[in-house]
Image (cartoon, grey):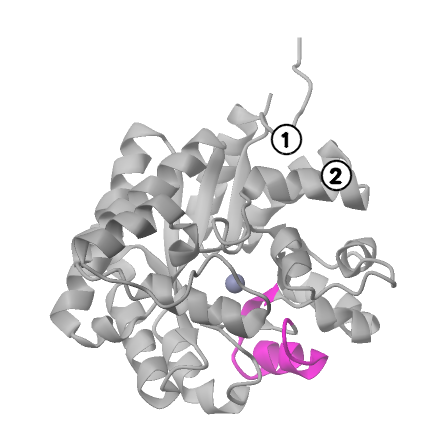
Amino acid sequence: MKKELTVENIPKAELHVHLEGTIKPETYQKLLKKYHETPSVNPYQFRNFKSFIRGFGQVVSVLREPKDYYWLALEFLKKQAELKVLYTEFFLSISSRMHNEGWADQAFRQIKSAIEEVEQKDKIWARVIVDINRASSWDIDGKIAARYAVANRKNYVVGLSLGGNERAKPIEIFTPTFRYARKNGLKCCAHAGETGPVENIKKSIFILGAKRIGHGLKAVDDLEFFKQNCGKSKIAFEICPLAESALRLINQKKENPIRQLYRSGIPIVIGSDDPTFFKTDIENELLYLIRNLGFSIKEIALIMKQSINFSFLTKMEKKKLIDLFKQKTP
Ligand SMILES: [Zn+2]
């Protein structure tokens, strides 16, 4: 007899989560101690997007040795295994420490070891997307990030992303960086229409060649356009319900934009963004969709499975993973 589907027992795929946003406060404290650091702010307490980004930077700054990335990735992926997340694509931010090529190389290899360890022991898969922070010294960082991303395809990097505060820099300046990444076999995505206008989503798709849009809730300002263009060109929106409401990107008075996108047939995938900052995980995000936005468990299970089609895996890998999903669905 078939078991009833529940959020706990369905196999999952998560495509929008920042590795540094998964550091547990206890782990952060341990790292502070290890490096004899006294921080000026508590990164887990923030009032708005700006103070959140500041806190995020503070957490990134305590990852000082390449081995820290191994422990961080392993701790996160073990949790994903418990939550039955069969596939995770996570963002990695390029910190200033990574400007040292030898150091960066080791950090990427440490992450690769963690991915291989959970693949063997826990039978889950994970891949890396290098994320450029628009607000940092972009002219150097963007190019370095793209170069590292391409050089580390052998270490499971599959994509390049644009992140951070959209108002910090215009999208156009990243055009050559993203062209270089695409030419060298990476897939691209961008946080857009999160803290910026709907035009940023269009520019990310047409100028950067983004195949997925992070958050993108401003798409509701031109729903017709995305209805026409997203389904057939296989562009999905990465929705992180709790992060979006935590950062007050949702206007409570209007129909919820997540529902609007979904009702319009625009593909969505789900992520927990920065789970320890927003006190959440993928399971919690899915429960939110069911309890607050009227999604059914069948719809959620389908979104999880269809997420694989929007992942940055190869065709063959997608096929293998979809088979695994079928096997693991109760
Ligand atoms: Zn994000």
Q: Which element is circle 1 on? A: loop
Please state which of residues 94 and 223 is positioned toward the viewer in this rendering: 94
Q: Quadrant of the C terminus?
A: top right
- Report which quarter residue 121 is drawn in: top left
Is 249 positioned to the left or the right of 64 in the image?
A: right
Relative to 90, is 187 above or below? below
Q: Position of residue 115 (x, y in %)?
A: 30, 44
Q: Which element is circle 2 on? A: helix
Is 239 positioned to the left or the right of 69 in the image?
A: right
Q: Amino acid at mark 1?
A: Val
The residue wearing badge 2 is 290
- In magenta segment, residue 101: no
Q: Amino acid at mark 2?
A: Ile
Q: Position of residue 39 (x, y in %)?
A: 32, 64
- The number of discs equals 2
Relative to 329, is 60 above or below? below
Q: Find residue 7 and name its label.
A: 1
- Report which quarter residue 10 is drawn in: top right
Relative to 139, is 248 above or below? above
- How far separated are the C-alphas under marks 2 and 1? 9 Å
- In magenta segment, residue 202: yes
Can residue 17 be seen from the camera position used here? yes
Check if mark 2's residue and mark 1's residue have beta carbons within 8 Å: yes
Is 102 positioned to the left or the right of 26 in the image?
A: left
- Residue for point 15% across, 66% down: 103
Q: Which residues are magenta?
A: 194-214
CB of mark 2 near ligand 1 (< 8 Å): no
Q: Position of residue 69 (x, y in %)?
A: 25, 53
Is 51 positioned to the left or the right of 97 in the image?
A: right
- Residue for point 36% across, 90% down: 139
Please state which of residues 143 and 167 is positioned toward the viewer in this rendering: 167
Q: Quadrant of the N terminus?
A: top right
